[in-house]
Image (cartoon, helix red, strand yellow):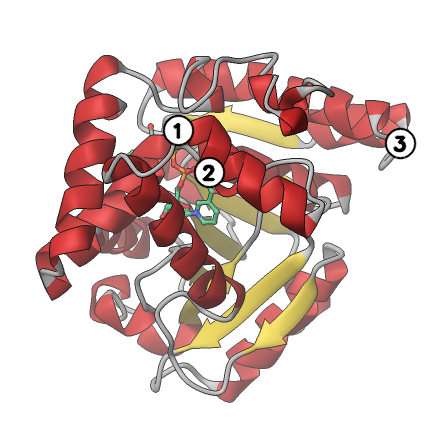
Amino acid sequence: MKLKDIRKVLVVGGGTIGQQIAFQCAAHGYAVTLFDISPDSLRAAKRRIRAYGDYLVAERHIKQETAEKAIEHIVPTSDPGQAAAEADLLSESVPEDPTLKGEVFAQFHRLCPSRTVFTTNTSLLVPSQFAKSTGRPERFLALHFHQPVWVGNLADVMPHSGTSPEVVSLVRDFAKSINQIPLVLQKENYGYVFNAMYSGLNSAAIALAANGVAAVEDIDRAWMAVMKMSVGPLGMLDVVGLDTVWHVTDYWAKHIKDPQTVKNAAFLKREYLDKGWLGVKSGRGFYSYPHPAYQNPTFIHGE
Ligand SMILES: NC(=O)c1ccc[n+]([C@@H]2O[C@H](COP(=O)([O-])OP(=O)(O)OC[C@H]3O[C@@H](n4cnc5c(N)ncnc54)[C@H](O)[C@@H]3O)[C@@H](O)[C@H]2O)c1
């Protein structure tokens, strides 16, 4: 299979990042099906994809016509059979739960053509954890994106030991074709390259809040002031989605049983998830949206 044989991309999971992957592929000329089990999520995805296109146009990353064309090329569906038909490449972005991901791959293995290449966008798991469930381990690997996909355009291409080298090359070429800088890993690594570094920062920022060392705003202010950034680590986690952050933290809390990681997971659940505060997508997280305090020019001075 060559890059030119990839025409239809199936994105499974129409949440925060699936929406952006769908947009990225559609804007680069691929026919895209966006599958989600929840019709409500699909309705929200349609709205948010439009808002994402508007944001990229407003920030002068793309032209209005590109945004319109991309949106036209995305077919949202909650019918798995329709979604799978004629798919050449599947990009999975369902919640960060290894059992769920395994079930989703097994379901789509039954429905997709045998040629379909399966990729996972997992943040902190590794493809060998679900390779068997895909039913096609040699055509399976991780293709992992960074938010916002259009701007943060690095994509990790991470095979497991059973991925065929041809499929690795194909997916690297595919990543280039959607204007991502492909970073092919030499071995599996939890957190790939960027996330492996970045998750250390995030855990430290959550620990500072969970341990009551400093206020949320001051933790971000420290990072923003010294690093000259327009957003701090906790503000960025609102963009990622606090449920996704909790899934990752809770997974590691259960696996490594490090007391601070356990505390961080409990803090996120109690103070944010249980209140429905999931970050930008729910209008409230560490900050309130659409106008979070850190965007105020006086924020950095503690006002
Ligand atoms: N948010 C990010 O910045 C980011 C970046 C890179 C990777 N990821 C990874 O991408 C994945 C998704 O993250 P997200 O933040 O978009 O999550 P999300 O919660 O915003 O979206 C997940 C979507 O999956 C849908 N879903 C649940 N079960 C499903 C199923 N069985 N079949 C199809 N759809 C199903 C949900 O309805 C929801 O719309 C996670 O593995 C996450 O670690 C997230």
Residue 69 in sight in this render = yes
Question: In terms of secondary structure, where does tag 3 sit?
Answer: loop
Image location of residue 279, percent across then percent down: 43, 24
| Label 2 sits on residue | 219
Q: Residue at horizontal 9%, vertical 60%?
A: 257
The residue nearer to you, when weighing 125 against 178, is 125
The residue nearer to you, when weighing 206 against 188, is 206
| Label 1 sits on residue | 215
Q: Are marks 1 and 2 in contact (CB under 8 Å)?
A: yes
Give the amino acid at mark 1. Answer: Ala
Image location of residue 16, percent across then percent down: 48, 32
Q: How many marks?
A: 3
Residue 229 is marked as none
The residue nearer to you, when weighing 64 against 125, is 125
Q: Residues within 10 Å of mark 3 (few under 14, many from 20)?
A: few
Q: Quadrant of ligand 1?
A: top left
Residue 16 in sight in this render = no
- Among the 4 quarters of the image, the one containing residue 38: top left
| Label 3 sits on residue | 60
Image location of residue 47, percent across then percent down: 58, 14
The residue nearer to you, when weighing 300 against 263, is 300
Q: Residue at horizontal 19%, vertical 30%?
A: 269
Q: Specify whether 134 is left or right of 217.
A: left
Q: Specify whether 189 is left or right of 143.
A: left
Give the amino acid at mark 3. Answer: Arg
Q: Where, quadrant-wise, is the C terminus in this rendering? A: top right
- Among the 4 quarters of the image, the one containing residue 210: top left
Q: Where, quadrant-wise, is the N terminus in this rendering? A: bottom right
Q: Are marks 3 and 2 in contact (CB under 8 Å)?
A: no
How many angstroms separate mark 1 from mark 2 (CA)? Answer: 6 Å
Which tag, 3 or 1, sits closer to the chain's start? Answer: 3
Q: Residues within 10 Å of mark 1 (few under 14, many from 20)?
A: few
